[in-house]
Amino acid sequence: MEAFLLAYMAPVMFGMLVVLLLLGFPVAFALAANGILFGLIGIDLGLLTPALFQALPQRVFGVMSNESLLAVPFFTFMGLILERSGMAEDLLETVGQLFGPLRGGLAIAVILVGAMLAATTGVVSASVISMGLISLPIMLRYGYDRRLATGVIAASGTLSQIIPPSLVLIVLADQLGRSIGDMYKGAFLPGFALTALYILYVVAVALIRPKAAPAIPPEARTFIEPNGGHGIPSLLVLMALSVGISYAGVQYLLDEQAHVDELIVTSILLWGAAAFVIAVLNKVLRLGLLSKIAERVTFVMIPPLALIFLVLGTIFIGVATPTEGGAMGAVGALIMAIIKRRLNFKLLRQAMDTTTTLTCFVVFILIGSSVFSLTFRGVNGDLWVEHLLTGLPGGEMGFLIVISLLTFALAFFLDFFELAFIIVPLIGPVADKMGIDLIWLGVLLAVNMQTSFMHPPFGFALFYLRSVAPKDDYKDKVTGKMIAKVTTGQIYWGSLPFIVIQIIMVVAVLAFPGMVTHYKADRPQVDIEEIKIDPGNFGGYGGGGYGAYGGGDADTSGAASDGASSGQSDQDYNSMFK
């Protein structure tokens, strides 16, 4: 037994961790206890030294002093303040009225609002529960297919994992040792591409099965003009005018070499600012040029959009770090809640309690992960993982495919925090040695980890939706009709098409790495083979640079070797150590 443990300590340690997690032990304590247990076994067998555990306090203090992790409470607090101050209700009502007259319009509204909530809350539970409470009864009232309605809500909530400022992107960047700002830039296009795929699926369902996604009836449309119109032309004119102003501003402010993320963020900020100013002038001066729906869309959607892209914009263009951007976003969320007169002590306390709980959750798992990785590396577990993965057929692509399949399989049992703290520290160094861009790997894993919230039967997004979906038949308060309950099976079946879409997105990120690696497009390309180091007059012991070691020989490099030059070299050399 002793010989077996000496030979296979690393795989036995990893297998024990998997067993503990499957038995339901808390992740942080399973990681830490596993690390300490096998560390003591290793010391007893002579494989490790007791001095190994002297590094533990430094690791714990290293976690606590990691400034990058401050972004977690800041962005969480920002999102919770915005969500609990009624932003979700306002957005769903406004966007629902905007797209409601179209087939599938309510589902499209849920996806768009889900993307906006993802860019503010960064927390899946908040997004799914909010939209489940607000939009699910409305979709059931107007005859939406239950599988489509529940699938759209659950999938839209998981966008919080990939659209910046996502918490999982912060954790992945920290575990991979890369910039959070670069991870945000890399995830920008895949996140919104996934949103577009969700919308395309809803449009396809509405065209193929119109009864599954009906338009809301005329009597349910609240923003009606005195002439009976819906005010959409006014909104289109406002948007067109704002786009023109945004285009002119971008041409004036940015040069042709501007990065794609900087271009997108600046364009949206200018577009939002132009629309908001026009709407404010119309309201203050009572010009009557805008319709009700145009004013409603502008005043409800522009402020949170402006806050989101102001925070992301300062990060993308390098004005602020993600931690500073998160702090600015938290202050901005408080200001918006005060302006809406919805900030009170109860809301503030709830947001702070949830933020503290989630932050402690992350930090405790990270401490447990540090204890586990200390012992795992001590027993050469990193070398075992490296030999296991580098021997896979197919090179880099084979490695990425296997990692994607492994992550997809483990997502049935583990959530994204557990995957990020257990799997990523093991595969990150291997990927780095293979020359794989770690930002690309991180975004690929983030897209893949989304499925952990959608997998039946353990998907957390499905559990969150089940908690707020009607479990019994009920009478609708508006129509007075009896509405059938939503079954767990309908929720599970509704998630499957969106899991397929997420898998398609994983394949797209694998096949087209430029979707992610554009984050470094504006950086100078350096060829290591072309780098030359010219030591000048400090060329070594025999180069004649300075008399004490040069022996008075002539400088063969062509540099002057007279007394003045030698004396100057001695003076320069001595000045280096003053």
Image (spheres, rainbow, N blue to C red):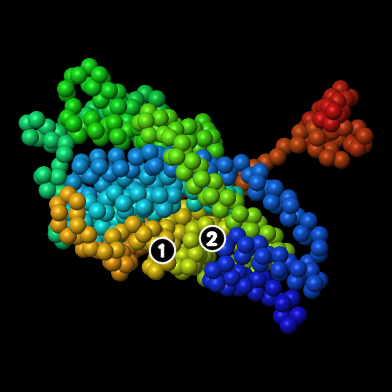
* Residue at mark 1: 459
C-alpha gap between disc 1 and disc 2: 14 Å
Q: Is residue 262 something one can see in this rendering?
A: no
Place residue 84 in its image quadrant.
top left
Place residue 247 in its image quadrant.
top left
- Residue pushed farthest left? 227
Q: Which amino acid type corresponds to the residue marked 2 in the rendered image?
A: Glu
Q: Is residue 421 something one can see in this rendering?
A: yes
Q: Is residue 165 above or below residue 56?
A: above
The residue that appears at 24% across and 53% down in the rendered structure is: 137
The residue that appears at 53% across and 50% down in the rendered structure is: 357
Kind of element beneath mark 1: loop
* Residue at mark 2: 418
Which is more toward the observer, 349 or 522? 349
Give the image location of residue 138, x and y in percent.
Answer: 22, 51
Kind of element beneath mark 2: helix
The residue that appears at 32% across and 33% down in the rendered structure is: 302
Q: Which amino acid type corresponds to the residue marked 1 in the rendered image?
A: Gly
State yes or no: discs 1 and 2 in contact (Cβ < 8 Å).
Answer: no
Image check: 147 left or right of 425? left
Place residue 334 in its image quadrant.
top left
Q: Is residue 280 above or below residue 230?
A: above
Q: Earlier in the sequence, mark 1 or mark 2?
A: 2
The residue that appears at 51% across and 42% down in the rendered structure is: 352
Q: Residues within 10 Å of mark 1 (few under 14, many from 20)?
A: many
Image check: 118 left or right of 74? left
Give the image location of residue 458, x and y in percent.
Answer: 42, 66
Of the 4 image quadrants, the one containing the C terminus is top right
Which is more toward the observer, 277 or 348? 348
Image check: 145 left or right of 370? left
- Residue pushed farthest top? 285
